[in-house]
Image (cartoon, grey):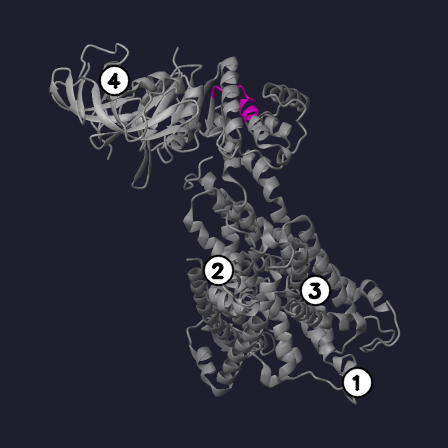
Amino acid sequence: MLRWLNSLMAGLIGLVLAAPILVVAGVSLNAKRSLDFPPNGLSLAWYAEIFTDPGWRGALIASLVVAALSAALAVAIAFPLAWFIWRWRAPWARAFEVLGMAPFILPPVITALGFLSFWSTAGQYGEPWTVVVSHAIFFVTLPLVTLSLGFGAVDRSFVEAASTMGADDHTVLRTVVMPLVRPYMISGFAFAFVLSLNEYIVAYMVAGFTLETLPIKIFNALRYGYTPTMAAVTVLFVLLTAAVFGLIARFGDLPRLLGAWIKPD
Amino acid sequence: MSALVLDGLTKRYGGFTAVHGASLRIPHGQFVCLLGPSGCGKTTLLRMIAGLEEPSGGQLLIDDRDITATPAHKRDFGMVFQSLALFPHLSAGENIAYPLRIRGVPADERRRKADSLLELVRLPGMADRPVSRLSGGQRQRVAIARALALEPKLFLLDEPLSALDAKLREAMQIELKQLQRRLGITTIVVTHDQREAMTMADLVVVMSEGRIRQAAPPMEVYRRPADAFVADFIGMTNLLEGEVTAPGRASVPGGELVLDGLPPHGRALLSVRPEEVLLHPATASGGQGSGQGAVANRLAGTLSFVRDLGASVEFRIDVSGREIVALTRPQDRPAVEPGAAVIVEIPAEACVVLPPEGGTAGERPS
Amino acid sequence: MIRRAPRSLGEHAPILFPALMLVVFFVIPFGLMIAVSVARRIPGGFYEPDLVLANYERFLSAFFGGVLSFSLELAALVAVVAVGIGFPFTYRLARLPRAAQVRWLVFLLSILSLSEVIIGFAWSTLLSRTAGITNLLVAVGLMAEPQSLSPSFGALLAGMVYQAFPYTVLVLYPALARLDPALVEASRTLGASPVKAFFTVVVPSQRNTIVATLIMAFVFALGCYLLPQLLGRPQHWTLSVLITDQAIYQSNMPFAAAMAVFLVLVSLALVGLSLLFGRKEEA
């Protein structure tokens, strides 16, 4: 009885979580330029339009480029910081860790407004590359968290063993630590990539008028009337996101990454 | 020929001193065991020798060269860790070849060396086995082979056998000792197991509370313990407190002992190994011609407990409220049962006179 | 390799780049925003450095007082609903077989990382007249005519709970995954039914986790900047929406910054509080 209720609850929650996406998926298959559900005729034309329409294609490319570059920059910032905190006894360095966590915990509007003030003061307002830097800072939390977990999981006796065998700091990092934290680094990159791909407010405030990423494009389209292409893009996004997390789950330890580990003692 | 010299090595963590001025001289080719209970500072001392802890004071010299400030990766020592620290992302062979790889040794030469080391530790053909698929004993051997890959000047092992079960541990102790003898490499092993130390060591260094209590060959540590701690830690012993009554005479609970080496007056602390204690039924008089002083060195008591340990029989005797333990071979077992009145005979040559309790030959521990 | 305090410049080198990046691109923008919040606005979209508190005085008006109290109440409601559903759900989730857990986590992460734009669009479609769930109700004969359910407060609440739910679950997940199953087993052997065990053992033992999660979900909901525009009516606009509106459409940066500073203070105070509760749990 209780087991049955539990399954019912889980099923219901799953259904509600999936419902908006299922409806949007249905809408995206409409044959005509209308948002009907169930769809009025079936067609994949709206998916084709993402790639053929220069506006949508441009936005897709812009989003992917920004996401890839900003995720790489976020990892480049997070890796040395997480390594330094793990490698050395430097309690003051924790202050930078807190700085790295802050943008993710505070309401996003605040970070967005901070960047808007900064880039306009610096005279770079509207430059596409400012979105890359802004997203890298905004999402640096994710690789920072995964890498801190990753370094924390490296047994220090590995490092000591390597150093007794003649490895200096750099060699230890390259030959022992790196191979062990690589899955965590890739996860951090993937998290930052996916979130940057979906990010709206920071991108919009920093360069919304010059660089149209996909979320900005969808939002603008929302204001000028709905088209099934938006639905198709949404479905594409959901699939892409699920695929990335699926890959993390496949090659990494997702429950552990999300904090479900038992302390060894 | 000089060797490894520890000169007043000290390690302090804040207000806590883990190692108090350890001084020791280890000649080439010796097998040394750092022995003591947990928390005695033996691992800290080993880690200072390896370069994994910075000494707070003192010096470390090898062949008269000061290496106190040399980082671990420039010392060319081989070390086996308690956790073994085998790299999980490398195979057995790659683990062994790791020190060669980071020195740029070509792959085929690395492979040859790894194979011959695997042969040395009796694991031929295991080079490609992932570390996770090795048994406890095999992992042990791989860790040893890896530490020996560079033919190190010094071979350090931190409780290397503690994860193995009792049978395998004994076998590995013998194997490790044979290997060390064959290679002639100066070796330092940390252990809390006195049997292990007795099995392997040329030199046993007994530590407690951060201090070296005694450094001597195993049998000397056993027969001539430097203080009460060593006597008690190495094997079982009876500690008797006595009062010197006349030159060469001390009164102890239950009787009087006549022996050499007593202080001229005052209190005396004696250690007697249980297997040296002789036990007689109270009715019988005299041992097997054990001595002139018929009354001296014989204490009257009551047998309180007997247990059969297979290879020996243990007797616990109540002598004036103090317990004395005696050990005999089964075939020498006297015909006494618990509750019987017995005579405990302590031969003069079995007694070791120790410095008074709470102090060592040196300063008092703080 | 000895873990000690770094001494030479070379040992400090790795942290230079991250520290520089975080200071230049986070601390300085943050400071600038505070500076802008006390700047004087020049009509036409610009401002000049000054030290006026006029921007802060403005939210003492009845209108902004109303917006603020609505924002806080809405965020609180979202947090309570999300934790109310999320806690029992996460408790069950953490006890599923590993493969099933991973599937759920992938699903939840996918929804969590969806843009607010997409969530807003999806929910407005789901609640619309032409494609919405009312069509289903019509189809099974429960309703005569399909109708639009959005914009409305209900639509806004649904959208925000939808967005906050995966976040809530992922915040609760570590604590509930580490919960010792022997606790519940012990209470079961003492005669508690599964439901009773949940309410008498699991919930009380996680009281601080629940409070900390409520606060985190509250801050998360407070940050919601688009859903009120897409799913609610103008009277449902929250502080975050208003900040965006002032900064972009009204070109009143100083006022937007002042509101943002205020929002930071509220959020920081709450995050600090949640850390306090989180720490208590560990002790």
* Residue that extends furthest to the front in the rendered view of this protein: B283
**For mark 1, what is the residue?**
C138
Mark 4 or 1: the one toward you:
4
Quarter of the image holding residue C241?
bottom right
Residue A1, horizontal then vertical, whole percent:
65, 70
- Residue segment shown in magenta: B144-154
> The disc numbered 4 marks a residue on which chain?
B
Viewer-side label of 3, 1: 1
Above-or-below relation of B302 to C21: above
Give the answer, above or below, for where B12 lies relative to B332.
below
Q: Chain of mark 1?
A: C
2 and 3 marks in contact (CB < 8 Å): no
| Residue nearest the observer in this picture, C50 or A128 | A128
Q: Which residue is mark 2?
A: C27
Tag 2 near tag 4, CB within 8 Å: no
The residue under label 3 is which amino acid type?
Thr
Please, which chain is the residue tagged with disc 2 on?
C
Q: How far, Cα to Cα, is label 3 from label 4?
A: 105 Å
Residue wearing tag 4? B284
Query: Which corner quadrant of the image does residue C232 belong to?
Result: bottom right
- Please tell me whether residue A265 belongs to the stretch shown in magenta: no
**Residue B146: percent from the left, percent from the top?**
56, 26
Q: Residue furthest bottom?
A: C144
Residue B141 versus residue A37 in the image, above or below: above
- In this rendering, do the residues under marks 3 and 4 share a single chain? no
Q: Indicate left or right for B201 with A207 as reference.
A: left
Number of the label disc, if any, that sits on residue A213: 3
Secondary structure type for disc 2:
helix
